Amino acid sequence: MKAFVENILDVAKLKGVPYADIRIVRRQNEEIEVKNGKVEALIHDEDVGFGIRILFQGAWGFACSSKVTKREMEAVFAKALKIAKASSKVKGIEIMLPSSSPVIDQYRTPVSIDPFDIAPETKLNLLLHADEIIRRNKKVKISEAFMGSYKTEKIFASTEGSYVDQEIVECGAGIAATAIEGSEVQVRSYPNSFRGNFATQGYEWIEKLGLQTEAERMAEEASQLLSAKPCPSKITTLILDHSQLALQIHESIGHPIELDRILGTEASYAGTSFLKPEMVGRFRYGSELVNIFADATQPGGLGTFGYDDEGIKAQRVPIIFKGILANLLTSRETAHHLGKESNGTMRADGWNRIPLIRMTNINLEPGDWTLEQMIADTEDGLFLTTNRSWSIDDKRINFQFGTEIGWEIKGGKLGEMVKNPTYTGITPNFWNSCDAIANRDHWQMWGTPNCGKGEPGQVAHVGHGAAPARFRNVQVGVMK
Amino acid sequence: MTGKEAFLRLLKNMVQESPADQTEAILLTEDSSLTRFADSAVHQHVAEVNQTLILRVVWGKRIAVVTTNTFQPSSIKKILQKANSLAKVQHPNDEFISLPGPRPIPRIGTFSKNIRRLTPNGKVKTIKDILTLVKKGGLKASGAFSNGEVEVAVVNSLGVDAYQKFSDLFLHLIVENDKSSGYASFVSRDPDQLNVDALAQEAISKTSKEEPFQIEPGEYEVILEPYAVSELLSFLGYLGFHALAVQEGRSFFSNRFGEKMADEKVTIYDDGLDPEGLQVPFDFEGIPKRKVVFFDRGVAKEVTYDSFTGGREGKESTGHGLIAPNTAGPIPINLFMKAGESSLEEMIRSVRKGIYVTRFHYTNVVEPMNTVITGMTRDGTFLIEEGEIKRPIKNLRFTESILKALSQVTAISRDRKVCSEGTVYSRRFVTGTVVPAIKVEGFNFSGVSAL
């Protein structure tokens, strides 16, 4: 394979291309879905191909193919060059890549047990057992269990002399109980909604999740929700559990800090951002307690890797420091807007997509509180957990989230369960209202395996570390 | 592209060589390109060639699926072995009856050779033409222009043998100044249908030099353009227009067939064969598409089936099977809403005070059984007063039940539009909804986007 790569980079140099890179990516996925005691999906997916990115006459061209042969690479190179030439006729500011020292290295996700070494029967039995426990509750009409194992092997090489070989291993699992009575449908999921929690770890991660241990509680809570009282509509104090807070970070911090969105290059699809490059170092994003890092080196994080898809080493970067915006997520092309070098966030969803600025692990640093202290210190409010719905505008200002379950807080104690909880807010106002964050003992990594961006669509796997946190004066119970 | 004969030969060989009780093989190819522009410049321009094989094997009632894009005639045996070894460790699914048998496939044309005119240079020239029009209005543009050729073949061991070649293009455009933005989009199988001037003018007409003002959230009469209506229908399709959701008791249709759930002006159906939409002759099980009417003059009528959900009830598939293993259900992908009798201008003239919505953004489900969704307005939100579009307003968040909105429809436009988001995250297979604009009394806006 290395000979193919060297050949095509030599071709690029001979053609006078100032910069070219090639990525060869092989992905294996194994997914199992169990529903109501039946294995609805048992699938193995293998996908191989390469993509060539060319910078020519100040414009990008990209082409790719699933046929990994020397001849096809040459044809794809020619197509990418043709595309770059065409694009250069309607280019904006000439794209310049700052010089970069070549990197030759390897990275492997450290795993104890390769998830692909575990027999499918073992995985099926684990899921079927958890599913069976859920179905013991008669109000639960749909029981579900999911497990996914993913392995990505990728080579990145560039005309600058970089050659990076990586293997990223990920896995995750989850269960869900759906209770139905008349027109009432309520769901409880563990450890998180939308298929569970995911990490760059081996099967040891799955073994630690405790799906069977939590199955009964999920079923019970789903059935209790059927007769729970509706979430009240008011402005109140909100405590978010770390899984919901992870998505709050994702939508209202992770996406707005992507410099490509800020510069408008995602305007036609996902939108832009309320942030501007000149706000770095000045803008008060949140209260003094809010400290956010983008950390691609976080062990086990779903956004953890060795190098990004431009060959930039994984980094830990302060994004918000004591509430002030300190940095943005950048690429080689965009970093100069901040007078900086790339902080290594360019990733592509496979061989057939170009790299875009993507979140790595966007983590909220822990505070000093215990969750118990936080609740005891709250006279009136709501405690919400596990995301059910999310929505935010194209500039990432106005958000609305729904969670699976909530509890009232009255006089410093958890009170009655509430169903269909929702809350809404304005991004900086919300983060500035944060007055308590739980400590390291409550802090946990959450994997978001479904982060969408770009055209053609790309799905990124990203992570968020969070501990429960408290926010004041939040509108809850939207549309009541 | 591979071609019909080679395609079917490869799949038939695979099915014949499979030792499983039943075998289904699907082959998809894609040769596509997408050109993105932002800030009135092309910034991303990509091309892809790919082929994907999806193999479903059945041993008794044990089913497994293997997907790969690396296959040669010499590697067929290995792929079959992988699928069959997975199936053998599978647990039986007692509700599975059988893969479907063959049915006659309607012969319709879904490919235009003109698609090949969309070369990198050709597309960049089209974009340049748009940018010139936009610049005249003192505006900047962003968008995406994509074209593709797709082949789909489905063969199974019961005799299903279906092949179709598709062409498609879509172009969506956002134009903006520092005060406002406007949107327009186009989708078709034939590039000759693209009218760049009209598309640009549509987007430009939604912009304003006036600062948008903020109105209080609350219930307003609304006119929803087809882009917004399309979003509402797509959510209904996902939440409840299919048999799996009904069988699991999580559809808004559950136990309500025959009931009037929407205004009598509302008729919604799925029809893969209607030439007004993006036609698709058969589903991913090789079964011909049948028209399915969900709401007939407001009354809940029927839902879509694939072979699995049909088998559960002893019914035939309606031709809505998606790629195996499909655990989401036979979600309809060719939705239509019946046209009304009004012109858009008449609808606007009939509003005393209301809001005009071009499109929604980032919508999501809040309460599935009540079809409550939330999302933002985007790229052209206006206040209507005394029958006229008066001024632009800041984007609003809505939180509303789709069924409630459809029960309060007071007018429907006679013109319909094909709306499509193009490809979304998975394999390229461009479909679209065909929808009119609607006027709704009492639509709930729950917030406003403003710092």
Image (tube, coloured by chain):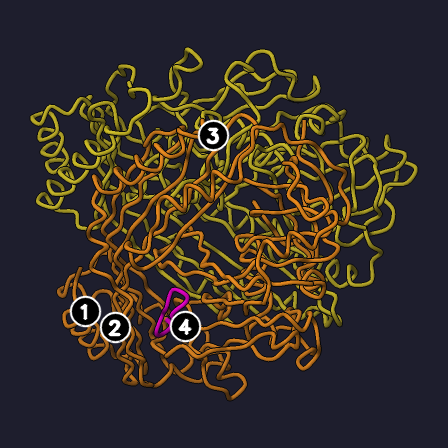
Where on the picture, by quarter, is residue A320?
Answer: top right
Residue with the most extreme right position: A411
CA distance separating discs 4 and 1: 27 Å
Write down the residue under mark 2.
Answer: B163
Region rendered in magenta: B275-283
Residue B229 covered by magenta stretch: no
Tag 3 and tag 2 share a subunit: no
- Circle 3 packing at 10 Å, graded few (<14), some (14-19), many (20+), is many
CA distance separating discs 1 and 3: 41 Å
Is mark 3 in CB contact (under 8 Å) with mark 4?
A: no
CA distance separating discs 3 and 2: 41 Å
- Circle 4 packing at 10 Å, graded few (<14), some (14-19), many (20+), is some
Label disc, if present, on residue B7 of the rendered structure: 1
Residue B118, x across and y down, in percent: 23, 48
Element marked by disc 4: loop
Write down the residue under mark 4.
Answer: B274
Q: Amino acid at mark 2?
A: Tyr
In the rendered view, does B37 fall on the left or right side of A67?
right
Write down the residue under mark 3.
Answer: A261
Depth check: B159 or B228 in front?
Answer: B228
Q: Earlier in the sequence, mark 4 or mark 1?
A: 1
